[in-house]
Image: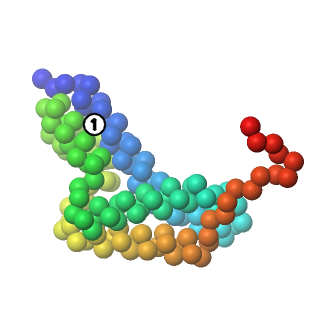
Amino acid sequence: MLDLPYQLLANAVLILHIAIVLFVVGGLVLIVVGNLRGWRTVNSLWFRLLHLATIGIVVAEAWLGIECPLTTLEMWLRARAQVSTYSGGFIEHWLQSALFWDAPPWVFTVAYSAFGLAVVAVWWRFPPKPVRRHPGATRV
């Protein structure tokens, strides 16, 4: 008999993992498109630093041979729920299929490193800008 709370927590971790991937990939697209269209908000320093730090962590994990802590946590929760790591409902199956690919580790290291270099190149091409306060605004 499976333990439903662990299964639900594993699914929540999987969804969080997908959200982070979408933030990294979508964030880069948003930064480039936003700059080409003149959207100032895509150059917010906090957004750009968070984006750079996130891909930096992914690249560092790949180079150091460290498995993503979210993957480790999800698999641990699935083991506690006594379910296979690749079974489940329709949405869970497709989210896992989108996130977990079968390839040698060096392929991911190269891909993550190339993507990290793209983020750095975009940082250089479209540098972030600190948030400016309006002259009459008061700080609280």
Q: At which x and y percent is residue 120?
A: 49, 72
Please tell me which residue lies in front, 15 or 63. Answer: 63
Name the outermost residue toward the right: 136
Residue at (16, 32) in percent of width and height: 80
Q: Which quadrant of the rendered structure holds the N terminus?
A: top left
Residue at (37, 59) in percent of width and height: 57
The count of marks equals 1
**Res. 100 visible in picture:** yes
Which secondary structure lies at badge 1?
helix
Q: Which residue is mark 1?
A: 10
Which corner quadrant of the image does residue 100 belong to? bottom left
Question: Would residue 47 be found to the left or right of residue 54 on screen?
Answer: right
Residue at (23, 55) in percent of width and height: 67
Relative height, residue 17 to residue 117 (above, below)? above
- In this figure, which colouring scheme has been used for the structure? rainbow
Callout 1 amino acid: Ala
Q: At which x and y percent is residue 92?
A: 30, 41
Relative height, residue 40 to residue 69 (above, below)? below
Q: Which quadrant of the rendered structure holds the C terminus?
A: top right
Please tell me which residue lies in front, 51 or 97. Answer: 51
**Res. 83 visible in picture:** no
Residue at (41, 62) in percent of width and height: 55
Question: Would residue 30 be found to the left or right of residue 107 on screen?
Answer: right
CA neighbours of label 1 inside 10 A, class few (<14), some (14 to 19), many (20+): many
Question: Would residue 62 be found to the left or right of residue 124 on screen?
Answer: left
Q: At which x and y percent is residue 53?
A: 45, 59
Which corner quadrant of the image does residue 93 belong to? top left
Q: At which x and y percent is residue 36?
A: 66, 70
Please tell me which residue lies in front, 74 or 88. Answer: 74
